[in-house]
Image (cartoon, helix red, strand yellow):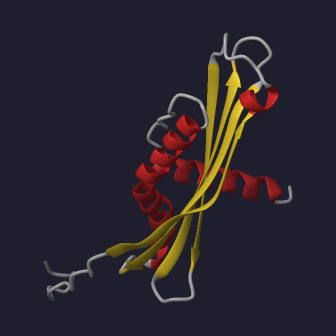
Amino acid sequence: MTDANGAPAEAAPQIRMQVLAQYVRDMSFENMVAQKGLQGGDVQPDIQVQVSLDARKRSVEHQYEVITKFKVTSKNKSGSAETLFLLELDYGGIFHVENVPEDQLHPFLLIECPRLLFPFVRRIISDVTRDGGFPPLNVDTVDFLALYRMELARRAEAQKAAQPVQ
């Protein structure tokens, strides 16, 4: 390839990413059915999953910590709509990332890194719900790109609403 002047274009360095560590940062599971002594007879669960993401630079060069936060709430559809269980999981990863352009680093950290962590999060949620006395919950795949775009749109709306009217 050549640039506009006919000189050979310099190849962009290849992006490097390595997962250095992954871990449960915080987890909580509350089985309301067992706590309240409710009978499991007429239970039709309505499951809501909320996902949020956070990323920050670490003190070591090219290292970033990415945290995926899942809040899973199951309520009974029939009858009183009581909460059956509540699971909160903060799952983190430490990533070594090189050669990502600065303007693309934020989306890279909040889309690609959580995508790598997600299978482990799904497994933990499945195991915890099963061990908590419920059928294993296999969380649907999360579209982290769509989640990122929704967050950008939400921030743009909030910024627009915060501007004074002239």
Q: Where residue 87 sits: x, y (%)? A: 65, 43
Q: Nearer the viewer, residue 165 or 112?
A: 112
Question: Relative to 135, is 120 above or below?
Answer: below
Query: What residue lies at 46% left-to-right and 51% top-to-bottom?
Result: 145
Q: Nearer the viewer, residue 97 or 70?
A: 70
Query: What residue lies at 66% left-to-right and 15% top-to-bottom?
Result: 43
Query: Which quadrant holds the C terminus?
Result: bottom right
In this rendering, the count of numbered labels is 0
Question: Relative to 59, is 51 above or below?
Answer: above
Q: Where residue 27 sits: x, y (%)? A: 64, 54
Question: Relative to 74, is 109 above or below?
Answer: below
- Whether residue 111 sits left or right of residue 17 in the image: it is right
Q: Is residue 166 visible?
A: no
- Whether residue 37 sits left or right of residue 2 in the image: it is right
- Whether residue 62 sits left or right of residue 163 in the image: it is left
Q: Where residue 79 sits: x, y (%)? A: 77, 11
Question: Relative to 81, is 62 above or below?
Answer: below
Q: Where residue 62 sits: x, y (%)? A: 45, 84
Q: Nearer the viewer, residue 158 or 31?
A: 31
Query: What residue lies at 56% left-to-right and 82% top-to-bottom?
Result: 58
Query: Which quadrant holds the N terminus?
Result: bottom left
Specify the quadrant of the image occupied by residue 148.
bottom right
Specify the quadrant of the image occupied by residue 141.
top left
Q: Is residue 108 visible?
A: yes
